[in-house]
Image (cartoon, rainbow, N blue to C red):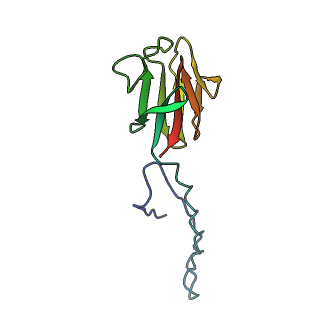
């Protein structure tokens, strides 16, 4: 049995290939190794384009918040990444996380809840143009 390593594989990935080798015979042809199966195509890369939230005031864009970190907190606290000056927003209201599948918004147990496209959510993957409502504040999700 022999093991070969492939430096091209990332941590947590593995590839296993088996082969059948016949035992040497007395005076016959050399052992024949079965061809390895062709490598599988890697899965398509996750959507990695940067994204942003756009604050809408009276239906028009007024401020842009780039989602440059893996986790962005939205709330009334001054320490929040996106500070919302809205009495209907909790101090730590919601978070937007960057994941392999894209961006996910999650309510952080807020008093008044978080809505995406007028539907209350606990957690939801964001799609282009989704409108997030926190209190009376509306943010629109956009890819750059």
When asked about the image quadrant of residue 50, the answer is top left
Residue farthest to the left, as pictured? 79
How many labels sit on residues? 0
Q: Where's residue 11, x and y in %?
A: 42, 50
When asked about the image quadrant of residue 70, the answer is top left
Q: Where's residue 35, x and y in %?
A: 59, 74
The front one of 74 and 124 is 74
Q: Is residue 50 left or right of residue 136?
A: left
The residue drawn where x is 39% and y is 61% is 7
Q: Where's residue 115, x and y in %?
A: 60, 23
Query: Would you place residue 67 above or below residue 133 in this image?
Result: below
The residue drawn where x is 43% and y is 53% is 10
The front one of 117 and 100 is 117
The front one of 27 and 51 is 51
The front one of 111 and 34 is 111
The residue drawn where x is 43% and y is 14% is 91
Query: Would you place residue 144 above or below residue 21 in this image?
Result: above
Query: Would you place residue 42 above or below residue 19 in this image?
Result: above
């Amino acid at each position: 049995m022999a093991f070969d390593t492939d430096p091209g594989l990332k941590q947590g990935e593995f590839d296993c290939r088996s082969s059948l080798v016949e035992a040497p015979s007395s005076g016959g042809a050399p052992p024949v190794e079965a061809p390895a199966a062709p490598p599988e195509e890697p899965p398509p890369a996750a959507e990695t384009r940067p994204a942003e939230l756009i604050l809408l005031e009276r239906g028009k864009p007024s401020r842009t918040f780039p989602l440059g970190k893996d986790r962005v907190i939205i709330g009334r606290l001054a320490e929040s990444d996106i500070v919302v000056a809205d009495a209907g927003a909790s101090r730590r209201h919601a978070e937007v996380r960057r994941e392999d599948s894209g961006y996910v918004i999650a309510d952080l147990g807020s008093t008044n809840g978080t809505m995406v496209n007028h539907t209350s959510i606990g957690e939801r993957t964001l799609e282009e143009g989704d409108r997030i409502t926190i209190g009376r504040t509306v943010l629109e999700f956009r890819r750059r």
